[in-house]
Amino acid sequence: MSYSSSSDTPPAPAPRRWWTLVTVGLAQLIVVLDATVVNIALPSAQTDLGFSDGDRQWVITAYSLAFASLLLLGGRLSDLIGRKRTFIIGLIGFAAASALGGAAGSFEVLIAARALQGAFGALLAPTALAVLTTTFTIPKERARAFGVFGAIAGAGGAVGLVLGGVLTEQLDWRWNLYINVVIAAVAIAGAAVFVPRIQRTGPRPRLDVPGTILVSGALFSIVYGFSNAETDGWDSPATWGFLAGAVVLLVAFVLWQRRAAHPLLPLGILVDRNRAASYSAILIAGAGMFGIFLFVTYYLQTSLGFSPMQTGFAFLPMIAMLVLAAQLSTNLLLPRFGPKTMVPIGMTLGVVAMLLLTRLDLESSYVANVLPALIIMGLTMGTIMPAAMQTATLGVDRSFAGVASAMVNTSQQIGGSIGTALLNTLAATAAADYVSGHLPATAATAAHAAVAGYTTAYVWGAGFFLVGGILTALLYRRRGHGVSIAFASAARDNAGEPEPVIVG
């Protein structure tokens, strides 16, 4: 089977595709903002439900474990049972789980609801991207649509911080979960009307059960291993044991995919250089993005004394620049220069933003010191995410669009888990070293130690982006060498397969 657009003629454009984009954008928003909107609500939820500091991490971990481990299964299910049906099921399930969490009267119910959110999010996120991939087939329109979608994917975490601060201070921590019900209700109505139903033209493929078990176990082990490294350290058996198990399961998964009659993730999708570069870019950008949200949030609240709402609004300039950069990149710059130029430029901007953040201290101000770095980080994410997401899904056989889209979400989620665990560990170690070298440990020493820890994290974050810039510059093909955004239409013109029927 081929995985390039040269053998996969796109369907005729859906008549209400721009309304489809609005619907898909809402679905993407609730999945992405949920990674951060709950963080700000955690102190209030802890006071209300009475759980310990040690248990607090499970409000985040329960979601990320279910989400990451089931993403490829969710993407493949959308290929098997139909994207419109899967999309609506994902929205309904996510809304129901959010309502359960908002109404939780105990810690155990809240954790169960967060795990359910993650499971339905794993169904919803790749399906949303697959719907976008198969709906927008005209190159200019596709670029515009992915500009919007990529901006939402990049800015969703910051939107979560803004929304979380407002809802927690003005209403109640439970509204950080209830808000998903409101957004999902609108998206469900939009999906019923505007998401096209594609009529299957061939035999229904089967689900690769062994492959699903292997890769789900591997992804669970990766996220759990890195999450455990945050709390118990890298020498904990639960850390290195799960990470080692993940390697074994991933090797077994690859070997199985080479012989499976109906592979969950055909390896041809991954070995394409452009897609491999795109997945790598998304993983690295995810690690850097989560680091920015985590440590800048800590810095603003603990070092500069910002309230949760002030912290959220402090990220608004970054969101504005991200949206602007995403539109300029996808509509003007990416078609002209291609991802081989644009993604490394975005990575370079990420290095600059991180290095600017290393200059922060207890006397720094938001306007003079933090704001320039956030603006450049907005340009970074707006340049990287839409280009990488569009290239990662370009030219994939429609029957595997869901699982290829799931790889985008998986890369971002794994990047976030790796980045958070590594940077947290490095920051904590640097802070401890600072205190031991500046005894006695006074409150002032602790404050300076925290900033020293953040600075170490930013230096390593700059290293992530530097590696990402070099890697993507080497991996992406030059324009005209293989399928690329600029030449997708030429590949489509040479295709000869019949078009599937879109039922509006």
Image (tube, helix red, strand yellow):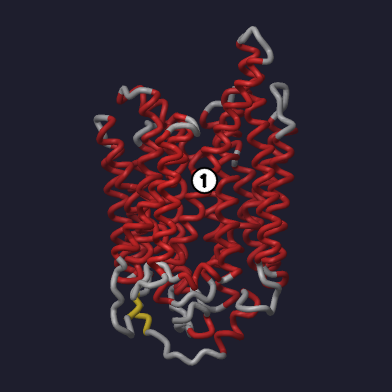
Horizontal arrangement in the rendering, residue 1 relative to residue 81 (left or right): right
In the image, residue 260 sits, relative to residue 280, either above or below, namely below
Give the tally of numbered discs: 1
Look at the image and tell me whether residue 295 can be seen: yes
Residue drawn at point x = 65 percent, y = 65 percent = 475
- Quarter containing the C terminus: bottom left
In the image, residue 261 sits, relative to residue 115, either above or below, namely below
Residue drawn at point x = 29 percent, y = 64 percent = 209
Q: Mark 1 points at which residue?
A: 416
Residue drawn at point x = 32 percent, y = 53 percent = 120
- The front one of 192 and 385 is 385
Q: Which amino acid does label 1 sit on?
A: Gly
Image spot of residue 71 (x, y percent):
39, 57
- The front one of 399 and 311 is 399
- Quarter containing the N terminus: bottom left
Horizontal arrangement in the rendering, residue 259 relative to residue 21 (left or right): left
- The front one of 8 and 276 is 276
Look at the image and tell me whether residue 19 can be seen: no
Name the element at disc 1. Answer: helix
Image spot of residue 69 (x, y percent):
37, 52
- The front one of 472 and 137 is 472
- Where, by quadrant of the figure, is residue 91 drawn? bottom left
Image spot of residue 288 (x, y percent):
60, 45
Residue drawn at point x = 40 percent, y = 23 percent = 53
Image spot of residue 375 (x, y percent):
68, 45
Horizontal arrangement in the rendering, residue 101 relative to residue 346 (left or right): left
In the image, residue 470 sits, relative to residue 117, either above or below, namely below
